[in-house]
Image (cartoon, grey):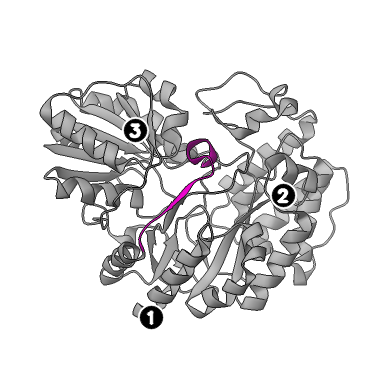
Amino acid sequence: MHVLLINPYELGRQPFGLAEPAALLAQSGFQVECLDLSLQRLDLAALGRAALVAISLPMHTATRVALEALPRIRAGAPGAHVCAYGLYAPMNAALLRLQGVHTVLGGESEPDLLALAQAVRDGTAVASDEPRVSLAKVSFAVPDRQPLPPLSRYAQLRLADGRTRTCGFTEASRGCKHLCRHCPVVPVYHGKFRVVPVELVLADIAAQVAVGAEHISFGDPDFFNGPTHAERLVRALHSRFPDLSYDVTIKVEHLLAHAGLLPVLAQTGCLFITSAVEAVDDEVLAHLAKGHTDADFDQAVALTRQAGIALAPTFVPFTPWTTLEGYRRLLVRLVDLALMEAVPPIQLAIRLLVPAGSYLLELPELRTRLAAFDPALLGYPWEHPDPRVDALQRAVQAWVEQSASRPRAEVFGHIWALTHEALGMAVPRLPESALGQPIPHMSEPWYCCAEPTRQQLESF
């Protein structure tokens, strides 16, 4: 029986969310094909062969693209059982069912996906009204990346000196033990996380190195959820592949709590750490339940620099609590900390998403500001009480979209000007010291919580 796995979007990376279930299904005798809509168009022949079509939804942009593609998927595979799985599938289950999806899976979904494939093969599969979400430990398979486009077609690592490295992608853990209110992991995992065995992670990386990977990007929501596991993994990785570099994502709170591990990361090839700082306003950070303060951000910058690792902070700069002056303060902080080159421009445009099931809905003062759920947005719309803030966000978003190929400093400079003009202030000259040093970063200019571009929605 043919199974078609579809990836709508994975930050320009070769998706673990297809490669790992592809291996599991193939081991059980299924003929598996993979389709990555970020690089490929819908394959009508593959759709026609498939008895089961399973769509991976790891993030907001992927779900938006999938909803655009579903009518064509259903038309191309009218007799197939259609499944959606991944982080964003359960929270959008009702909407997905309206688009013809028969089964929705979440959490550690591989066993349920395999069972579904077996049921389709046996003719016993039925549509399910409720999503199936499991957080039980699973037995992982070494991912099979053969059905996917080659690594050379995916986003590359750009080094500070302009050279590039072919980038692979893997996961060492899933879920998160923290409860940040805006995080999409929380409504599914509710504070739990699961580790992928070190030996399996190393086998996955070895397979990618064999086909040209020079750098590995770890997709864990937080690499230090299990610090002992993380240390064992990076030491083993460096021992086996001493020339391989990598990057990870770590909370500010964990950077401070496990500062002693930062030299270990540096010694084993970590080039940069992505950290969800989100805001430099303690009130906003409290609303988001981030677990750190603005002062902690300063300390995280100092600790990573001391260790010789670049810090790539991410932000949700536009929230219902953001003021124009607060946004200006964020830009000033990036100038003062010499982080202009370290922040992808899209990070300065992101508007807070409030998806179905979000822990943000626990905030009474936010609920009063929300409109009814918007299926097109995949969330609850909100308007800022100061229309100038929404106008600035739209202007920043438009500028970032049209400036993907421009230097980061140039993009930042225009946002700096837009912000001061919105406040009716003269535009101060940016000091040369504000630039900071260029840091290694991925060539993919977008981000999972950013609204997708029209090109992303139509690329397939």
Residue shown at the point (61%, 77%) measured from the top left: 308
Which residue is labeled 2 in the image?
279
Picture quadrant where residue 258 is located: bottom right
Q: In which quarter of the image is the C terminus?
A: top left
Q: Choose mark 1 or mark 3, whichever is in front.
A: 1
| Amino acid, disc 1 | Ser
Residue shown at the point (56%, 64%) measured from the top left: 273
Mark 2 or 1 closer to N-term? 1
Q: In this view, does 442 lie to the left or right of 99?
A: right
Q: Position of residue 51 (x, y in %)?
A: 16, 31
| Amino acid, disc 2 | Ala
Residue nearest the viewer, comparing 47 with 275: 275
Disc 3 is placed on an element classified as strand
CA separation, marks 3 and 2? 33 Å
Q: In this view, does 438 lie to the left or right of 15?
A: right
Mark 1 or 3 closer to N-term? 3
Which residue is labeled 1 in the image?
239
Which residue is labeled 3 in the image?
84
CA separation, marks 2 and 1? 37 Å
At label 3, counting other C-alpha atoms closer than 10 Å, the crowd grade (few under 14, some 14-19, many 20 or more) is many
Q: Which residue lies furthest to the right in this view?
A: 425
| Amino acid, disc 3 | Ala
Decide if residue 161 is in sight here. Answer: no
Residue shown at the point (72%, 24%) measured from the top left: 369
Disc 2 is placed on an element classified as loop
Residue nearest the viewer, comparing 233 with 453: 233
Picture quadrant where residue 429 is located: bottom right
For the residues bearing labels 2 and 1, Cβ distance under 8 angstroms = no
* Magenta region: 185-197
The magenta stretch spans residue 189: yes
